[in-house]
């Protein structure tokens, strides 16, 4: 498969050849779903906490006598049906950590990348660099490449000037190739990768193929 390569002004600079054997379309859908669920679970702090009727502050005495008041009987002020009472079945601190084996994680990455390539959502640049860390220059690059946010930019290693220029643009993220995961690929509709970044991504795909076949 050949992917067109352009410079940061949008002019075509040739093609990038990607081995079809690295892409996978006949499996990996469930692995990708499981990876996204696990990733999102692992981002949760698990610190939400509510007080039950046993822990809410207040007296334990009856608010009024059982009979003769003309009102419904009540046993305690901490009842969940009362204002400022305890919470029934509320959240409590817990660990949301979800584990996933590496083989399935690699398959999820391959499937997510394959879907991006098949959908024409991958743009390859000859290089990703900037002379000045200015947001308006990076915004101009987006216009020249006809890329709309949200978008993920990937390079072999992120140039500090590029990171500074892109950080004020909403829903634009810049990442080194070795840190990109399957969730990133599903989260961003457009993937813009430098040739050096593609080489690193290809190494990861090749490693996944070798491990899957061994």
Image: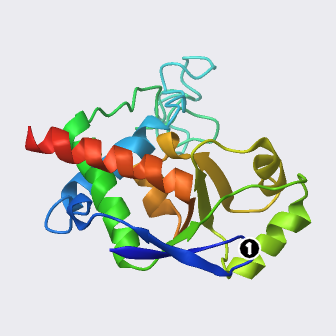
As drawn, 151 above or below 206: below
Q: Is residue 97 left or right of residue 60?
A: left
> In front: 23, or 44?
23
Q: Can residue 77 be seen in this view?
A: yes
Looking at the figure, which quarter contains the C terminus? top left
Label 1 environment density (alpha carbons within 10 Å; few <14, some 14–19, many ≥20): some
Name the residue rendered at 34%, 76% in the picture: 118
Q: Can residue 88 be seen in this view?
A: no
- Residue sitting at the far left: 214
Residue 39 pos. (x, y %)? 41, 43
Name the residue rendered at 87%, 66% in the picture: 137
As drawn, 1 above or below 58: below
Residue 111 pos. (x, y %)? 28, 60
Q: In this view, does 147 lie to the left or right of 119?
A: right
The color scheme shown is rainbow
Secondary structure beneath dot 1 equals helix
Name the residue rendered at 45%, 51% in the picture: 199
- Residue sitting at the far front: 14
Occupied quadrant, residue 21:
bottom left
As drawn, 136 above or below 163: below
> In front: 30, or 9?
9
Looking at the figure, which quarter contains the N terminus? bottom left
Disc 1 designates what residue?
142
Name the residue rendered at 33%, 70% in the picture: 115
Residue 152 pos. (x, y %)? 59, 60
Give the total number of marks visible in the rendering.
1
């Amino acid at each position: 498969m050949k992917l067109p390569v352009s410079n940061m002004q949008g002019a075509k600079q040739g093609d990038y050849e990607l081995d079809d054997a690295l892409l996978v379309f006949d499996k990996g859908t469930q692995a990708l779903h499981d990876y996204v669920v696990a990733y999102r679970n692992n981002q949760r702090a698990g610190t939400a906490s509510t007080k039950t009727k046993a822990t809410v502050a207040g007296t334990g005495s009856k608010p009024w006598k059982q009979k003769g008041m003309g009102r419904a009987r009540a046993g305690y002020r901490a009842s969940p049906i009362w204002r400022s009472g305890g919470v029934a079945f509320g959240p409590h601190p817990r660990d949301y950590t979800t584990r996933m084996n590496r083989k399935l994680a690699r398959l999820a990455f391959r499937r997510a990348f394959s879907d991006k390539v098949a959908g024409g959502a991958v743009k390859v640049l000859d290089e990703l660099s900037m002379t000045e860390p200015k947001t308006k220059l990076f915004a101009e690059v987006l216009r020249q490449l006809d890329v709309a946010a949200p978008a993920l930019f990937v390079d072999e290693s992120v140039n500090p000037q590029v990171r500074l220029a892109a950080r004020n643009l909403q829903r634009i993220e810049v990442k080194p190739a070795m840190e990109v995961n399957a969730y990133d690929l599903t989260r961003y509709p457009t993937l813009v990768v430098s040739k050096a970044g593609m080489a690193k991504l290809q190494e990861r795909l090749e490693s996944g193929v070798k491990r899957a076949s061994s």
